[in-house]
Image (cartoon, helix red, strand yellow):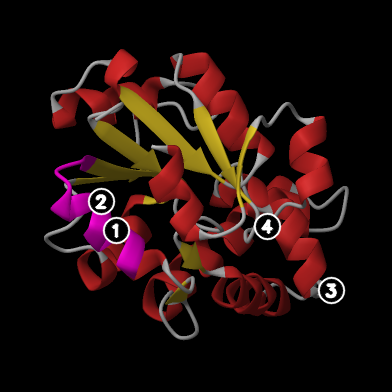
Amino acid sequence: MKYKAIIFDLDGTLTDTLEDLHLSVNYALRSCGLPERSLDEVRRFVGNGVRQLIERAVPEGTEPPVVAKCFDTFHSYYIIHCQDHTTLYPGIATLLMALHTKGYRMAVVSNKIQDGVTELAQSYFRGVIDVAIGEQPGIPRKPEPDMLYNALAQLGVDASEAIYVGDSDVDLQTAANAGLPCISVLWGFRSRNFLVAQGATMLAETPQDILQLV
């Protein structure tokens, strides 16, 4: 076994969460009297946590109290509706079970708020993924490496024994900052050309490719 542990990003890697994020962003924008965003715009905005998602979604020059209200509205709405349209990408359930059977330790590390990560992990990954870490006070978000270090500590695995899997430039930066190799998946929120331009060298077109790469 080349690696002992695999750390996954969540949105765009394991779960297709874009529609629920899009609907929640637009609910918050509408509630604050702001113009809505398209699905493709929200796709481009995700990756650095929900606070930056909202900061990117509101019009430039929006007053800070309005941004704060929009974020709070998004947060409250998304916790309730984070599974309305969210699903695992095809082949992910089979991949995770195969990795679990082979004895890999696994974690999810996401810039999504911890409540959302916990709920999705309990719904989709119970008994298969050992650790699920989301945005929380005191731990810098990706691309800082702290969340990965936290996951490695909980897994009891050294960085030299782990690999990271994600779908974005943020994931590539996070893996590099933590000293982990990175597999970039091509079914997520970023294109092949974009990922290659950001330095991706290991690409997975299907979940089965991940099984072969590790």
Q: Earlier in the sequence, mark 1 or mark 4?
A: 1
Where does residue 18 sit, x and y in percent of width and height?
61, 70
Q: Is residue 200 magenta?
A: no
- Cα–Cα span, label 1 and label 4: 20 Å
- Cα–Cα span, label 1 and label 3: 39 Å
Residue beneath the point at 55% across and 76% down: 20
- Cα–Cα span, label 4 and label 3: 23 Å
Disc 3 is placed on an element classified as loop
Q: Earlier in the sequence, mark 2 or mark 4?
A: 2
- Cα–Cα span, label 3 and label 2: 44 Å
The residue at which mark 1 appears reads as 96
Q: Amino acid at mark 1?
A: Leu
The quarter of the rendered structure image containing the C terminus is: top left
Disc 1 is placed on an element classified as helix
- Cα–Cα span, label 2 and label 4: 24 Å
The residue at which mark 3 appears reads as 35
As drawn, the label of residue 189 is 4
**Front one among 211 and 192:** 211
Q: Earlier in the sequence, mark 1 or mark 3?
A: 3
Where does residue 9 sit, x and y in percent of width and height?
45, 46
Q: Bounds of the magenta span?
A: 94-105
Residue 3 position by quadrant: top left
**Crowding at mark 1 (Cα within 10 Å: few <14, some 14-19, many 20+):** some
Q: Which is in the foreground here, disc 1 or disc 3?
A: 1
Q: Is residue 181 left or right of residue 23?
A: left
Residue 116 versus residue 30 in the image, above or below: above
Q: Earlier in the sequence, mark 4 or mark 3?
A: 3
